[in-house]
Each structure stands twice: as C-alpha cells, then as structure tokens.
Image (cartoon, rainbow, N blue to C red):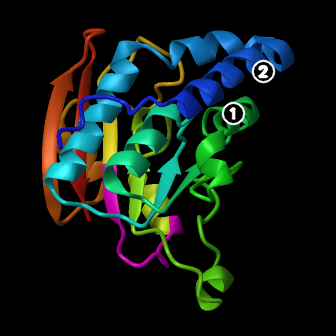
Amino acid sequence: MVVDHIIYTPETTNNWTNAHNQTQKERPWAYPRLVDSMNSSQLEGKLWLGDEMKKLEIKPKKVALLGGWYAHYLTSILIEYLDVELVMNFEIDEDAHFVSFKFNRRYKDAGKYRSMRKNIMFNALMPAKALEDGEDPYDVIVNTSCEHMFPMWKFREINYNLEDPLYVLQSTNQKEYCEDHINTVESEEELIDQARLLDVWYTGRKVLQNGFTRFMVIGK
C-alpha cells in the first residue's frame, strides 16, 4: 500500500474540528500556527516519510517523536499505515502540547498517543530507572524538525542508554524562512554526519510544493 494520503474518518473529522474550535476559543494566539501546520508541504513531507518506512518494512512498536508539534499528520500515518502501538510526542511548547491532544483524541483514548512536555536536547527520553523497571524502550526515533534544534549527536549522547533505536530524520536548507531554523543542512550527507549514523538504510531529498528542499535519512 502506497502512503499517499491521510486516512480521514468521521472520528478524524470530529477530532480535527474540535482542535480548531477549542484552539480558537481557548488559545487564539496559537491558532495562526495551527493553520500554518496544515499546508500541503507539511503533509507531503510526512507522507514521504511514511512511504519510505513502509517500503523498508519498518514495523516499530514504540515511536518517540521529537518536537512533533501538533503531530496530527504523522501520528495518523504511523498508526494507520505502520501499525505503531504507541506514538509519544516530546514537545517543549505548551500550546502545541495542548493542541496535539485535541487532534489526536481518538488515538489518546485508545492508548496509542501520548504527549510529554520536555526539552529533549537536555533531558533523557527514558531515565535509567524506567529501563531497569522493564519499560519497553523506543525502537524508532523520528525527528522531522532537525532544523529547529541542536544536532542529533547531542541527543544521542544524552540517550546513550537507548537500545540501538532506528533514526528517521528530516531537515532542510532553508535558513531565511524561519528564525527558528537554527541548524539547517545542505545535504543528506551533512544530516547523516550530524546524527553520527553508521548504518544508513535510506537517503533522499524532495522538493516540496512550497519550493523548499527537504532531506531525509534513515539509519542507526
């Protein structure tokens, strides 16, 4: 099955309509960014990620989504197409954390989606005690926002205790588009170097509908 669309059900409609209505009512200052998150290029990049993971027959159980914003597109793709059992969105922004639960209510209620406010570049995803207590580690780490944060080698140093997860990473070379783009790259190879990947499963680039070039790498 090619991953080329979101599976949009009546339940999805209810969740997403509620996300729009409640954000406008309770956090109107956050609404313009919600609208920005729903452009065609945002969806195009996430569908590309899901499609390549599907082709590689990657079947994760527990996914850590780093800086996943509202996680509306990607959570649906990971659960509906790849049968992921849990998507955990680590998001530092309080508004995004709030809105993500509205978009993903159906998955949250089913125990398949969670969100935690955490700066993942300064705090470990799983403290040692969680692993000692037998909590399942994340088998896939997804970061589609590498341009917004420190290089992924820093994340890997902090999370040395993770059990060899697979990394799925995206970044861009667009420096001027957003002041939050503090760590853009010029190629897939630069993204690989930043993440210190030694076992590369996939590399590629895609020019999205907004004209931006997006790079993606998958590996360990």
Image quadrant assignment for residue 133: bottom right
Q: Is residue 129 found left or right of 120 in the rendered image?
A: right
Q: Residue at x 42, y 67 (%)?
A: 61
Which quadrant is home to the C terminus? bottom left
Image coords of residue 174 (percent x, y): 34, 18
Does residue 162 belong to the magenta stretch? yes
Query: 41 and 123: which one is in front?
Result: 41
Residue picked out by circle 2: 22
- Whether the residues at callouts 1 and 2 have beta carbons within 8 Å, the answer is yes
Around disc 2, counting alpha carbons within 10 Å, would you say few (fewer than 14), some (14 to 19), or many (20 or more)?
some
Q: Residue at x 65, y 81 (%)?
A: 130
Q: Is residue 71 found left or right of 20 in the rendered image?
A: left
Please, what secondary structure does the residue beneath circle 2 have? helix
Which quadrant is home to the N terminus? top left
Image coords of residue 138 (percent x, y): 47, 68
Q: Amino acid at mark 2?
A: Gln
Around disc 1, counting alpha carbons within 10 Å, would you say few (fewer than 14), some (14 to 19), or many (20 or more)?
many
Q: Which mark is residue 8?
A: none
Q: Residue at x 37, y 24 (%)?
A: 43
The vertical placement of 116 against 216, above or below, is: below
The vertical placement of 136 against 180, above or below, is: below
Residue picked out by circle 1: 102
Does residue 114 belong to the magenta stretch? no
Image quadrant assignment for residue 128: bottom right
Q: Which mark is first along the chain, 2 or 1?
A: 2
Image coords of residue 199 (percent x, y): 17, 66
Residues in magenta, as a range:
158-168
Q: Amino acid at mark 1?
A: Lys
The vertical placement of 97 against 108, above or below, is: above
